[in-house]
């Protein structure tokens, strides 16, 4: 029987950066152009954790996002963006998205939230076609994983030198001292930021926990959207 593969992924400018591991073998990295290619690269015995909202409400915030902010506390709670409501996925541009949200919730949409909407739309289309039961693909959040990993929230923002160092220390202790240095040369200059790789590795760590039955989920009782997708954060 083939050893199941686990993987973690994060969105990047050029698509999605993915890190994979089979058993206790080496961690490998690649860049895939879109969410369809990403999900189709996973087989039924494999498991992929992705840093992107999947299940979406028709109106109002997701309980998972509210719980994640409380879990992280200030200031890391600001890294948890509220997932857009599902009607916004049909918007053509930022102005259209704000209009849609005002019609539904009587409030506009932030530029920050609109910035992540194309990736969410892309994943929504792909997962509903190729893994609607989410037997292979689940949602995570790097900062939630890092807190579970370290036992406390990261003290510094991930783009600051001190923030990069504290996250990379966790990765080095678990996956090996030279992992990031070994993976980064093949990704550099290809539309991937180093923190995208770090976040993907956080997803891989939580995917290991999920495979090993040690994972935790927000909220603990599953909630589903009207398309049957889980509204959750796995860590």
Image (cartoon, helix red, strand yellow):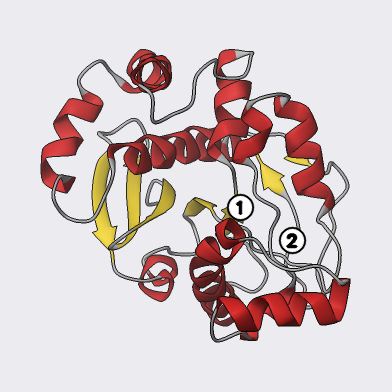
Circle 1/circle 2 CB separation < 8 Å:
yes
What percent of the width, then of the height, locates residue 186?
Answer: 12, 45
Residue identified by numbered label 1: 139
Residue identified by numbered label 2: 230
Q: Residue at x 63, y 32 (%)?
A: 144
Q: CA distance from mark 1 to mark 2?
A: 8 Å
Residue 36 quadrant: bottom left
Q: Residue at x 62, y 19 (%)?
A: 153
- The crowd level at tag 1 (other Cα within 10 Å; few <14, some 14-19, many 20+) is many
Residue 177 visible, this angle: yes
What percent of the width, then of the height, locates residue 219?
Answer: 83, 44
Q: Is residue 83 left or right of residue 120?
A: right
Instruction: Note whether 69 is above or below 179 in the view shown.
Output: below
Q: How many marks?
A: 2
> Circle 2 sits in a helix, a strand or a loop, which is it?
loop
Q: Nearer the viewer, residue 77 or 19?
A: 77
């Amino acid at each position: 029987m083939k050893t199941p593969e686990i993987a973690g992924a994060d969105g990047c400018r050029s698509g999605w950066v993915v890190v994979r591991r089979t058993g206790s073998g080496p961690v490998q990295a690649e860049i895939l152009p879109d969410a369809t290619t990403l999900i189709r690269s996973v087989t039924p015995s494999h498991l992929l954790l992705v840093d992107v909202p999947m299940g979406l409400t028709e109106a109002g915030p997701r309980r998972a996002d509210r719980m994640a902010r409380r879990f992280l506390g200030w200031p890391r709670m600001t890294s948890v963006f509220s997932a857009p409501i599902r009607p916004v996925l049909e918007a053509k541009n930022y102005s259209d998205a704000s209009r849609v949200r005002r019609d539904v919730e009587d409030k506009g949409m932030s530029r920050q939230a609109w910035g992540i909407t194309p990736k969410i739309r892309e994943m929504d289309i792909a997962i509903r076609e190729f893994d609607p039961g989410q037997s292979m693909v689940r949602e995570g959040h790097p900062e939630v994983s890092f807190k579970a990993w370290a036992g406390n929230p990261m003290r510094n923002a991930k783009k600051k030198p001190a923030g990069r160092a504290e996250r990379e220390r966790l990765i080095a202790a678990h996956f090996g001292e030279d992992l990031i240095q070994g993976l980064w040369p093949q990704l550099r200059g290809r539309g991937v930021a180093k923190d995208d790789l770090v976040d993907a590795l956080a997803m891989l760590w939580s995917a290991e926990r999920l495979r090993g039955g040690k994972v935790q989920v927000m909220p603990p009782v599953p909630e589903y959207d009207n398309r049957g997708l889980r509204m959750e954060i796995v860590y």
